[in-house]
Structure formats: structure tokens, C-alpha cells
């Protein structure tokens, strides 16, 4: 149970990190135009 929770948490953190990177790139492109 606990190990499954850790795996889900790690996947959520990875997904959130990728989302933040994409958001940062979009913001930089928007500011540069």
C-alpha cells in the first residue's frame, strides 16, 4: 500500500515538473514576442 502511494507521488511530481518546464518555456516565448 505505502510503496504504491510512493510510486503515485513520484509520478505526480515528475508530471508536475514537466508541466512547469513547458509552462516556463511558453511564458518566455510570450514575453520575447
Image: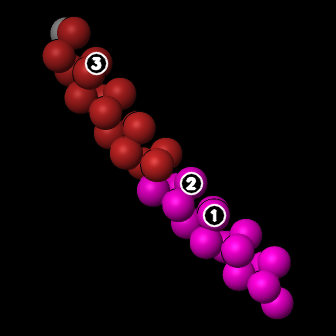
Name the residue beneath numbered marker 1. Answer: 24
Residue segment shown in magenta: 18-33
Give how far apart the Cα atoms at labels 1 and 2 are. 6 Å
Residue 25 colored magenta?
A: yes
Name the residue beneath numbered marker 3. Answer: 5
State the residue at coordinates (71%, 81%): 29
Name the residue beneath numbered marker 2. Answer: 20
Tell me the quarter of the image containing the C terminus.
Answer: bottom right
Secondary structure of residue under mark 2: helix
Applied colour scheme: secondary structure
Q: Which of these two is toward me, 27 or 12?
A: 27
Relative to 17, say whether 29 is above or below.
below
Asked which quadrant contains residue 7, the reply is top left
First in residue order: circle 3 vs circle 1: 3
Mark 1–mark 2 CB contact (< 8 Å) = yes
Secondary structure mostly seen in the magenta stretch: helix
Nearer the viewer's eye, disc 3 or disc 1? 1
State the residue at coordinates (31%, 33%): 10
Give how far apart the Cα atoms at labels 2 and 3 are. 22 Å
Give how far apart the Cα atoms at labels 3 and 1 are. 28 Å
Where does residue 30 sit, x and y in percent of width and height?
78, 79
Classify mark 1: residues with Cα within 10 Å, few (<14), some (14-19) or many (20+): few
Amino acid at each position: 500500500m505505502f510503496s504504491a502511494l510512493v510510486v503515485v507521488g513520484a509520478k505526480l511530481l515528475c508530471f508536475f515538473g514537466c508541466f512547469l518546464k513547458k509552462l516556463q518555456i511558453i511564458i518566455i516565448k510570450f514575453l520575447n514576442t
